[in-house]
């Protein structure tokens, strides 16, 4: 019984702590707390749900491909397919897998490149994009190119804004600085967005085919298990 | 004690119209060392996988299979995972974790061993296998032989009663393969562990095992102790007998009717010794030693390393390839064979030295060790057509390499052997002046190897030159014109095939080991047969 | 070999690093943070962090925050000058300085983090509590270098097979790169079926929860360190909240904190890694000197 209580008590405790910190205007620690808290449901589900060897392998491979995805594109600076791979994962294997692959890709690539205070934010941002893709494009009929491209375009900015947030909170503390920071990063975000759209236009079909083939080959991956 | 009992076992894959296993009745007793042999597709792997519940493929199954008296599907999950160990063919694919220690612990972690227990078991087993040297390494730094020993060790840590091994040595160099087999023998003898092993290269297993199952078309055709199987099969004159039995059978037939079928090199040597004066003289068929041909390619004093600080992988290496000849590179894992192929293909840039081509002849096809790296299209057919060869040629090659049923599939969905054959077909179709092959005979059975050999000979007759890397000494002895041993990044011996093998300990065929005192240049079964054909 | 701080149980070092990040984000007082920055920087030098490249962008980020704050924030009483008709105040400079030092300290703490919490120790921290997540991460740690190597080989083989000219259009380069990425993924999946069989063959899935082999007992030194860390941390935080030392720069400007004890407590907290190293060196030279 006591064991069952630990988690809710912990969550409530953290929320109370976050609220007091928020009142004290410690926005940065609050944001970290909230972000870490947002991982909790996924983490717990992932730990508790029984997953076959194939599923966990597939997730590991997808996260690794997303993490090293930049390597083949080294000749083209500022082109990186990570968001595309995460988005496709969400679409084909569902939102939960999308979140896990996104967050894991961010974490493990930083295990190689070096962690920073931005790691949780990156995990959150990519995880969110994976989750969103799964939720938005759940039914095959919604997977139309204009919609996909729109989502890809928005993702670029969404990702950028989430990543800006921590910096603004840490360095400026005031709400008035947000607009300035977001405006300053527009160029980067636009590049990311265009990149996503180009990837979707050129490679959505072939990559979708590859993932579908894998899904059939594995046989075990029913889409429903990844949702619910 | 009965370990496995199979009764009237029939199994059929959903995609096939014929059962892969037919009415198998089989009892395996504790402490046996069983060899499964037979041609590709005879059902060896399928049979082994039926005995390991966790990996039994989907399909229709009739008959019963019991493990220690209990039907296999009913034994406890933990007991099944713990007591029945399985080692797969490909050393790389079965590794799950990133470093050696975690990989060893993986199985024990699954079965909820305590940390202290894991550490104790790993420490103990490590010294048995001599793994102290690479315990702290990452998987990426290991050689193929080390990886397969690691796989065996990580299965053994669960203390299985029976070990099932599916062609575990097929990707190891001759020295590592022998070492691996000796580990199995020790486990069997010193701990009474039951071993079931399927092997293509069974020459060295026959003397070690206590029982041989010869499978044909999904049925057990012969089930007896090794000597008897060898006797029965050699009476039928098939290729599926070890070289040792082959030689003693021929001696018995032509020279000494009292000769027994022997399974070890030493016994055969004694047999030869006994009949020394009755053996006809033999000279190797004279090779056209026309050295005048201009070399297609000359490698001169090559130096190559991967990183600035790293050691040179190729050191002062020189090599010449004559046009229209087949040259074979042998050597241990990590001696630089594959690196040399890549340097010649132009994938790697050497730091010093020259690779000089005959004028106007610079065209090269490179077939890597891993066929997955080679394919670039979504259907096998596209892959073949992309070369732009004549239709008729493609069809002939496809039927000779038995690829007809694969044409519409994705190359990545084919089996390992099919991928290998498809890549070979593509390589041959490209008709470059130099064909570079890394381990082409891997995953092919006797029949396919012979076919590959004749295809290579045709390639040479059309003016092509072949350079291949292989661990398969028998293949090299049968089809290479020149052989070359790489050690530590340079060539230590570069000779005609016969001269090359005479006098080596490891890098030579079993036939040569047995007959070398009388016929130093004799290497292959064909040559043994030629002894009596002339007369 | 490892000395001092690196010898501690990974859990203790992880908690210390975490608390250090929290303190550096919460204690918004320029003097306190400078104290922290100096000690953390010293720690970086001690652990031989690769500072040469990162120092530049860390200082750059700090300067950026320092200079941009006054331009965006116009509150405060002491107007220094007008910039495009906007007042630039001393208080906003002060706030910018505090934020800059805070950011730089956090970055430096992460530099040390990357030296101390190696992937191996990272796995140690989480493999017991979150076995499945750590399995996933561990597998990624195997796949990522393998894929990188696979990519090098793949691109080499494919370049020989389909030779391409030097000059290519951007689109062709992009398509080629994507083709390789797809092949890489598809190839990795091929072997994975056998990997999955190998996992099941060794008991994966028999129990819902796995155990972890990494286990390190807490030593007396670990306990002592934990007590020290907790005392100094709680002391600092307690003083900070207890006496409500938080100040609003824009209202009052900067004043030295009312409780000088907090400087001592924070100083002892931040100095911990350097102290452990010092104690270890002293012990070493004593034992060598005696013998």
Image: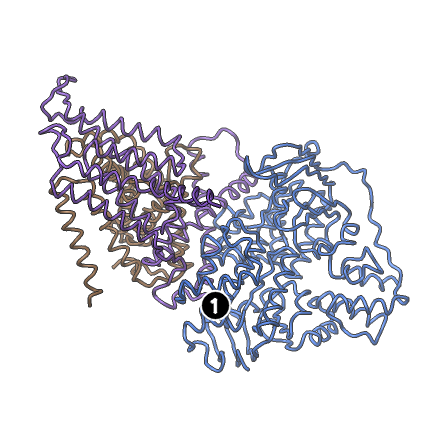
Chain colours: A brown, B blue, C purple
Q: Is residue B122 left or right of residue C12?
A: right
Q: Is residue A91 visible?
A: no
Image coords of residue A140 (percent x, y): 29, 52
| CA neighbours of label 1 inside 10 A, class few (<14), some (14 to 19), many (20+) | many
Q: Residue at x 43, y 66 (%)?
A: C203
Quadrant placement of the N terminus of chain A: bottom left
Viewer-proximal residue among A63 and C18: C18
Image coords of residue B317 (percent x, y): 68, 38
Q: Is residue B272 visible?
A: yes
Image coords of residue B383 (percent x, y): 53, 48
Number of numbered discs overlaid on the protein picture = 1
Q: Label 1 lies in what chain?
A: B
Viewer-proximal residue among A122 and A138: A122
- Regarding mark 1 in the picture, which secondary structure is present there? loop
Residue that mark 1 sits on = B158
Q: Is residue C248 left or right of residue B455?
A: left
Quadrant placement of the C terminus of chain A: bottom left
Image coords of residue A206 (percent x, y): 40, 46
Residue found at the far front of this picture: C290
When the figure is inspected, residue B133 is found, relative to residue C239, above or below; the finding is below
Viewer-proximal residue among B279 and A120: A120
Please tell me in which quadrant of the rendered image residue A216 appears. bottom left
When the figure is inspected, residue B260 is found, relative to residue B149, above or below; the finding is below
Please tell me in which quadrant of the rendered image residue C63 appears. top left
Q: Is residue B139 left or right of residue C26?
A: right
């Amino acid at each position: 019984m006591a064991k069952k209580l630990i988690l809710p008590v912990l969550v409530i405790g953290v929320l109370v702590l976050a609220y007091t910190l928020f009142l004290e205007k410690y926005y940065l620690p609050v944001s970290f707390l909230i972000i870490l808290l947002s991982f909790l449901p996924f983490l717990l589900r992932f730990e508790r749900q029984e997953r076959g060897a194939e599923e966990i392998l597939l997730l590991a491979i997808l996260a690794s491909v997303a993490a090293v995805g930049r390597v083949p594109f080294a000749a083209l600076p500022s082109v990186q397919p990570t968001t595309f791979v995460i988005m496709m994962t969400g679409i084909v294997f569902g939102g939960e897998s999308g979140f896990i692959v996104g967050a894991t890709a961010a974490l493990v690539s930083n295990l190689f490149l070096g962690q920073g205070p931005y790691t949780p934010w990156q995990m959150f941002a990519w995880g969110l994009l994976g989750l969103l893709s799964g939720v938005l494009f759940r039914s095959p009929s919604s997977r139309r190119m204009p919609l996909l491209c729109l989502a890809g375009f928005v993702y670029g900015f969404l990702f950028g804004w989430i990543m800006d947030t921590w910096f603004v909170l840490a360095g400026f503390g005031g709400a008035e600085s947000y607009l300035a920071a977001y405006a300053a990063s527009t160029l980067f975000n636009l590049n990311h967005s265009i990149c996503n759209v180009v990837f979707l236009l050129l490679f959505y079909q072939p990559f979708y085919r590859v993932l579908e083939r894998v899904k059939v080959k594995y046989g075990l991956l029913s889409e429903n298990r990844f949702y619910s | 004690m009965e370990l496995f009992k199979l009764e009237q076992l029939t199994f059929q894959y959903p995609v096939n119209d014929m059962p892969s296993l037919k009415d198998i009745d089989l009892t395996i007793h504790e402490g046996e060392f069983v060899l499964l042999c037979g041609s590709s597709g005879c059902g060896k792997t399928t049979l082994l996988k039926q005995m390991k519940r966790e990996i039994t493929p989907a399909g229709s199954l009739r008959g019963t299979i019991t493990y220690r008296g209990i039907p296999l599907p009913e034994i406890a999950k933990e007991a099944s995972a713990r007591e029945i160990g399985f080692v797969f063919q490909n050393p790389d694919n079965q590794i799950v974790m990133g470093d050696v220690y975690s990989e060893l612990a993986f199985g024990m972690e699954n079965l909820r061993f305590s940390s202290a227990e894991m550490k104790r078991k790993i420490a103990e087993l490590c010294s048995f296998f001599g793994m102290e040297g690479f315990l702290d390494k990452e998987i990426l730094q290991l050689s193929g032989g080390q990886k397969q020993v690691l796989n065996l060790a990580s299965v053994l840590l669960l203390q299985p009663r029976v070990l099932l091994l599916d062609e575990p040595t097929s990707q190891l160099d001759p020295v590592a393969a022998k070492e691996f087999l000796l580990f199995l023998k020790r486990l069997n003898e010193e701990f009474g562990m039951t071993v079931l092993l399927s092997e293509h290269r069974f020459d060295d297993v026959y003397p070690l095992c206590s029982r041989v199952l010869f499978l044909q078309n999904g049925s057990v055709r012969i089930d007896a102790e090794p000597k008897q199987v060898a006797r029965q099969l050699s009476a039928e004159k098939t290729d599926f007998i070890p070289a040792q039995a082959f030689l003693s059978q021929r001696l018995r037939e032509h020279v000494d009717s009292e000769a027994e079928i022997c399974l070890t090199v030493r016994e055969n040597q004694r047999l030869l010794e006994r009949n020394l004066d009755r053996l006809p003289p033999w000279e190797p068929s004279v090779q056209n030693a026309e050295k005048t041909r201009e070399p297609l390619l000359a490698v001169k004093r090559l130096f190559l390393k991967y990183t600035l600080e790293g050691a040179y992988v190729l050191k002062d290496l020189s090599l010449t390839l004559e046009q229209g000849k087949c040259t074979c590179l042998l050597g241990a894992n990590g001696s630089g064979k594959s690196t040399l192929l890549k340097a010649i293909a132009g994938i790697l840039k050497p730091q010093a030295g020259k690779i000089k081509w005959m004028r106007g002849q610079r065209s090269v096809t490179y077939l890597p060790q891993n066929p997955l790296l080679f394919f670039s299209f979504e259907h096998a057919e596209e892959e073949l057509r992309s070369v732009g060869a004549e239709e008729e040629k493609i069809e002939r090659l496809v039927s000779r390499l038995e690829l007809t049923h694969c044409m519409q599939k994705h190359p990545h969905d084919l089996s390992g052997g099919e991928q290998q054959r498809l890549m070979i077909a593509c390589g041959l179709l490209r008709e470059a002046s130099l064909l570079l092959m890394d381990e082409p005979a891997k995953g092919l059975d006797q029949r396919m190897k012979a076919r590959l050999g004749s295809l290579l000979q045709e390639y040479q007759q059309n003016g092509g030159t072949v350079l291949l890397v292989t661990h398969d000494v028998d293949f090299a002895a049968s089809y290479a014109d020149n052989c070359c041993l790489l050690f530590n990044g340079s060539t230590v011996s570069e000779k005609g095939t016969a001269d090359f093998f005479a006098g080596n300990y490891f890098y030579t065929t079993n036939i040569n080991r047995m007959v070398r005192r009388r016929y130093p240049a004799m290497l292959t079964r064909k040559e043994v047969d030629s002894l009596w054909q002339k007369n | 070999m490892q000395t001092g701080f690196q010898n501690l149980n990974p859990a203790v070092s992880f908690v210390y690093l975490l608390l250090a990040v929290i303190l550096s984000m919460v204690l918004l007082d320029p003097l306190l943070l400078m104290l922290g920055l100096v000690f953390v920087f010293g720690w970086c030098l001690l652990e031989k962090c690769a500072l040469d490249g990162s120092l530049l962008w860390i200082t750059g980020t700090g300067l950026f925050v320092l200079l941009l704050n006054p331009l965006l924030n116009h509150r405060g009483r002491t107007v220094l000058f007008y910039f495009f008709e906007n007042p630039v105040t001393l208080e906003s400079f002060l706030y910018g300085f505090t934020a800059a030092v805070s950011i730089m300290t956090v970055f430096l703490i992460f530099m040390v983090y990357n030296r101390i919490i190696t992937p191996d120790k990272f796995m140690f921290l989480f493999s017991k509590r979150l076995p499945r997540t750590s399995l996933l991460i561990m597998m990624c740690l195997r796949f990522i270098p393998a894929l990188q190597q696979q990519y090098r080989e793949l691109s080499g083989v494919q370049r020989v097979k389909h030779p391409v000219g030097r000059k290519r259009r951007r689109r062709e380069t992009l398509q080629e790169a994507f083709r390789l990425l797809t092949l890489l993924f598809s190839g990795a999946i091929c072997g994975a079926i056998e990997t999955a069989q190998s996992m099941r063959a060794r008991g994966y899935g028999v129990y819902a929860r796995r155990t972890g082999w990494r286990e390190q007992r807490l030593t007396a030194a670990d306990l002592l360190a934990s007590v020290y860390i907790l005392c100094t941390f709680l002391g600092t935080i307690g003083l900070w909240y207890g006496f409500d030392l938080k100040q609003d720069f824009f209202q009052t400007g900067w004043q030295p904190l009312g409780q000088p004890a907090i400087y001592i407590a924070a100083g002892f907290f931040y100095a911990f890694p350097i102290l452990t190293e010092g104690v270890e060196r002293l012990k070493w030279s004593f034992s060598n000197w005696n013998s």
